[in-house]
Image: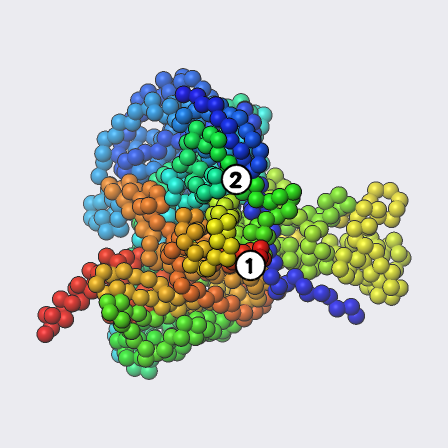
Amino acid sequence: MVMRKTHVIGKPFPLVEAQKKLTGVSCYAGDERFGPELLHARILFSERGHARFRLRGVEAARKQEGVAALLTGRDLHTRLGAVIEDRELLAVDEVKYAGQPLAVVAAESTEAAMQALAMIQIEYERLPGVYDIESALAPNAPPVHPHMASYRGFDQVQAEPERNLAHQVAFQRGDVEKALASAAFVLDHTYTAAPLQHAPMETHGGVAQRQGKGGLIMWMHTQAPFLQREVIARALHMDPKDLRIITQCVGGSFGSKVFVSVEGLLAAIAREVDNRPVRLHLTREEEFRAVFMTPAMRARVTMGLDDQGHIVAIRAIYDWNVGASVDAFLMEMQRIALAGAGPYAIPNADIQVNAIYTHLLPAAPMRGLSIAQVHWAVEQHVDELAEMAGVSPLALRQRNLVKGGDQLFPNFVMHANGLESCVLETARAIDWQPDHQREASGAVASGKGLAMGWSPILVSPHCKSRAIIQCDGENLCTVIVDGVDVGQGYYAFITQLISFELNFPIEWITVQPTDTGNYDSDWRAIYNNLLWSTGRALLQATAELKRQILSYVSEMWEEPMTNLDIVEGEVISYATKRRLSVLTLLQEGTGEGAPPVFRAAGVYEPEVKAESLDGALQSFATTGYAAEVAVNLETGDLTVLQLAGAADVGHAINPEGVKAQLKGGIIQGVSQTLLEEMRFKDGAPVTIDFMSYPIATTADMPQQIHPIVVEIPQSTGPYGARDLSNHVLVGASAAIGNAVYRATGVRIRELPITPQRIYDALQTQAKTVEGNC
Amino acid sequence: MKHDITFTINGESVHLTVLSHQTLLEVIRNDLGLTGPKYGCSTGECGACSVLLDGEVVNSCLVLAPEADGAEIMTVEGLSEDDELHPLQKSFIDHHGVQCGYCAPGMLISAKALLSRTSRPHEEEIREALVGNLCRCGAYADIIKSIQVASRARR
């Protein structure tokens, strides 16, 4: 028996595109070369919130020199959406939100396009708008979508359009009222989280070119080409087969390049011009004003604890301000309901998740999938409960955390998991102690806090995935998949898997950019379970490919296939000791006729039993966070001194890659917790650049960061692995919040934790203390 | 107004006619076809467009093209020599100093300038040198490590 070298699985492996990215040759938005025939598109966005509007000067703009095509909502009135079509491609008569597209133009140059749009005057007549959850739910509030019942997909949501409820997901078990009534401690608090902007460094863009009469090719920087094809084709009444999306390098997405934002407008305008390519590339200000926000959260949480230290009940109502569109947020709501009780085995639970329509720009989930915000609430609440009962927050967590074998949902038994290891390891990393309170030096006090996290990994019937591997003499081993690498290491994983399964040198393997033209049907690997779905498809494909190669050689050598194997790029016979390089095989074959081409496909199609809440649940990613902070008690200034983040990845196929993701999650966690908040005035964003919407720089990094990899294998995942990148920052905010409490004695329940909020809370605390004296 | 300008970019001399309002970034990307420097914000806040101008890091989105007349410019494309990767590039590959990669050309330029000032920078100096280069993936820790390792390798 020849031992297989396992040199690629579980060993450090660089990012596949790294060299291209580092030499400046990768193709991002704006980098495509198309020569002088390239046209440039610009979009006219509404600057106002809810209003009636008229456009004047459209015909003059259309005739402006250099303009190739111009569309308004009157030329092309169509709706779009993945499930519920609650957005218009271009507004007609009524603007629902600031940032809504009103017109799109393609011209010989960006300047000509801008000049054309500048000729259009927008006359607004202001209408009453609702911009936050409270005003949207108030009696007599204007409904954002009074005609929602007529939208395609309305039957897919639980909505009450007249009172701005866009969708609702609820989950119950046990008897919460009864359990709370008999609990020794009951605690009730409200937590909020601000809307965020995904703010990828690469703003949205792409190129589209009409092909003949009906076809269209788009070169796009998207995470979800198949989803985008479906949505755009439907909006433009095209056959999806006529729309081909070729993915390019993605300069960061974080969820903003999954659902269609401005891409539909690019497609629409490109169809208006004669087979010339049209480029769209948003400015940073447009990216802030008009792409997506993440929904703001209001969480009302009640928990009950018995005198034995068991959390006996939770009631949590999560309200989300989804702006004028719930479409991109629907699946996350299911996820939120499943995660909504926190990572605890609580026998009585009542979780309600509401999406509230307002006149703000559409919401889309961001990395952390809003589960990060859910934990901001639950994991601070657990600390507050622990203090109320006089027990250690770690001990309370250990007593109540969810364990393998717990059945919390009807069709799902919790798998073995590393949740407890995650929290213990992070606590150890920063030397968290149960009896350790604040340390003060002058005006600066420091403190440490913990939090855990769990994040459901779901599949839907649409999450089927396909992989095709072809081996031939020219290209050696090329791989076609339906997911997209956005820097998380997806292509590295694919390369590692194939290299291991076929025992090929990694240099032979090329992952092709994802192209909807490679498939005749709709394959749609979704971003949160790429490793799982593509991994399983690839395992099928590699098994079949290996069978084909060995079968071919078996005939050539006239030896039974069972004698043969592939070892380090060679077909060998264990019986006769013959060897043949696969390279030679691919280039020469038997020496007679054309050399062989081997091609195999694998498919992963999940069995989703029912459209129930738990029917699509596959597993939970679990995380732990521990933070040490320093707070200036005079100014409220907050510094994160150290932050430890742990995640159970099942099996770290690329350990350094996993750590890189964890370290990135830690930085984003700090950024979201301390810095980020999208602000609006009369419904229009006023955070429109990196000055008004700062994201973490090297100056905001904690002095020490501790990425910790926990590995409790997932029996159903490839090599026991579980997806990570989306879940990586769950728990970070609450750990920092809990640390701030320990340092200061004040509890901040609004995210982000700004110096102003700490200062105000300290002032209130001081007044309360004075009043008590 | 049009200006005839000459500058050296990645060792090659170029002559161009540019308009007064054109930025150096536009000229490098559109006229010279070097798309390593990226558009990120056009306000000098993100550093994705960083290039070396006479050895100093500048946001090329804030430099007007006529100002570059007579200058010596380096973009990320000029880092590797004869297809041999620069030690910084190698180190970024080995230590996961790149994720989505959009900030990488600017990061490398800032790192290159730092290493020409200080051959073996401390972590604090590296953090300071990169403060104008935003990375939304949050890869800072690995970027810093990549630069540290590269600086040691050079010696």
Q: Is disc 1 placed on a helix, strand or loop?
A: helix
Amino acid on which the number 2 mark rests in the picture? Met
Q: Amino acid at mark 1?
A: Arg
**Which residue shows up at 33% across the image and 45% down it?**
A691
Q: Chain of mark 1?
A: B
Question: Which residue is painted at 26% across and 58% down in the image?
Answer: A755
Residue A702 in percent (x, y) is at: 39, 62
Residue A669 position (above or below residue B53): below
- Determine whether, in the image, residue A469 is placed left or right of residue A87: right
Q: Position of residue A47 (x, y in %)?
A: 30, 35
Relative to A704, does residue A403 appear above or below in the rendering? below
| Depth check, front residue: A81 or A101 | A101
- Residue marked by disc 1: B152
Residue A164 falls left or right of residue A454: left
The residue depicted at 23 percent of the width and 51 percent of the height is: A134
Residue B74, numbered label:
2
Q: Residue A345 is drawn in which quadrant?
A: bottom left
